Image (spheres, helix red, strand yellow):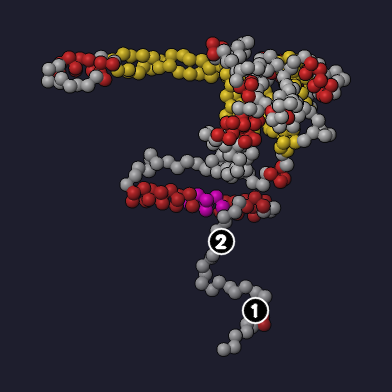
Amino acid sequence: MAKKKPDPSLQGKKPSNTAGVTKSRPQSRNPGHIKNRLKRSEVYGKYLLEKKAKKREMRLKRVKDAAELGTDISTSKETPRTLDNTREIEPTFVRPDDEEVIADEASDEFAEYFADTVRPKILVTTRPRPSGKIFHFIADLMRFFPQLYFYPRKSFSIKEIIEQAGEKDFTHLMVLGEKSKVCNGMIISHLRRTAAASGGDGEYECAGPTAFFKVSNVITSNDVPNHGSATSHVPELVLNGFSTRLGHRVGRFLGSLFPHNAQFQGRQVATFHNQRDYIFVRHHRYIFEEGKEDFVEKNDETTKSDENNEEDDENNQQTKRKAEKKKKTKARLQELGPRFTLKLRWIQEGTFDTQFGEYEWFHKRKEMDTTRRKFHL
């Protein structure tokens, strides 16, 4: 059967809707790409209404499913989707019971620091001709890191400083960079020679590694609200969120900056918290204090079995009524400062050498950061 040809006057035109029903396409995409402001605001209103209707439909569906299963909808709450719990699976993710990683960390460059057989001694300096504001940050770092000493940069190069620091038994070198009178970079180099840094060769020992971090959100102690004063006690160390092989190496590198003989009477904690490859550095003091509310702690007599209930009913009732009232003990944190954030850019084998040094890891943003849910630490 031959196909009926349309009238020549209708060629290139869309057929009209004779039913009189307006069909609207669902606006499932955020209309931020629309350049026309009036059209964008109109479409965005429809987008919000559809989003709200879809959310209400999903809520009613959860109520219906819970009623069919006989569960309480108020107690069964869904965990919200975040970038952390929906991150892409990293092939180098480390399990707590990984024997290979445990063996590697027992013989790496930082094993002696964590075993408390070697204490760190850090030299900190700045870029040439630093501003006066960076010295406030250095003063906070000297209260944050035990055994940290400042030497002016003058006209020395980093390689010359590394040679002189190694002769004076410094274990780490820290170089601070700045831009617009704000610290924006930190180079940390491990100066102590070990066999692990040379690839496990016992005959040849070398220093390293060296890491470069971008520094942001620097807040000195004086600018922290309700801050306390740090004491000379060695703080406790918390390394949190380092879950990959690279993360473990970076965490141990940062952990080697602290002695591992924490003085608990000082109640100070140094925290390196990794979240989405940003390392948040904080310094706190924890305080235990008694609250106003009471809680009831039963005596040991009430926990005894009631085997002779018939004989000692009256005695058992009296012992059950006995209770001791104690004050609730609450833990409170007081921030000491400083407060800053680190972002790893590269790790290099050996000491600082940008010309001939070999990189263990280099952050290539366009190649590595393919999605927002991919993290490396």
Farthest residue in the right direction? 155
Work out whether mark 1 precedes mark 2 in sequence or the reverse, and give the earlier one. Answer: 1
Q: Residue at x 67, y 47 (%)?
A: 370
Q: Nearer the viewer, residue 299 or 10?
A: 299
Q: Residue at x 58, y 73 (%)?
A: 16
Q: Secondary structure at mark 2?
A: loop
Residue 52 image point, x, y percent? 50, 49
Task: Please say if 4 is above or below 111.
Answer: below
State the CA–CA distance, disc 1 to disc 2.
25 Å
| Location of residue 142 by image quarter | top right
Residue 214 can be seen, yes or no? no
Q: Nearer the viewer, mark 1 or mark 2?
A: 2
Residue 207 image point, x, y percent? 74, 25
Q: Amino acid at mark 2?
A: Arg
Q: Quadrant of the N terminus?
A: bottom right
- Residue underneath mark 2: 25
Crowd class of label 2 (few under 14; some 14 to 19; many from 20; radius 10 Å): few
Horizontal arrangement in the rendering, residue 302 relative to residue 62 (left or right):
left
**Per the image, is 199 magenta?**
no
Q: Which mark is residue 10?
A: 1
Residue 231 image point, x, y percent? 61, 11
| Location of residue 124 by image quarter | top right
- Magenta extent: 47-53
Q: Amino acid at mark 1?
A: Leu
Farthest residue in the front direction? 203
Q: Nearer the viewer, residue 113 or 26?
A: 113
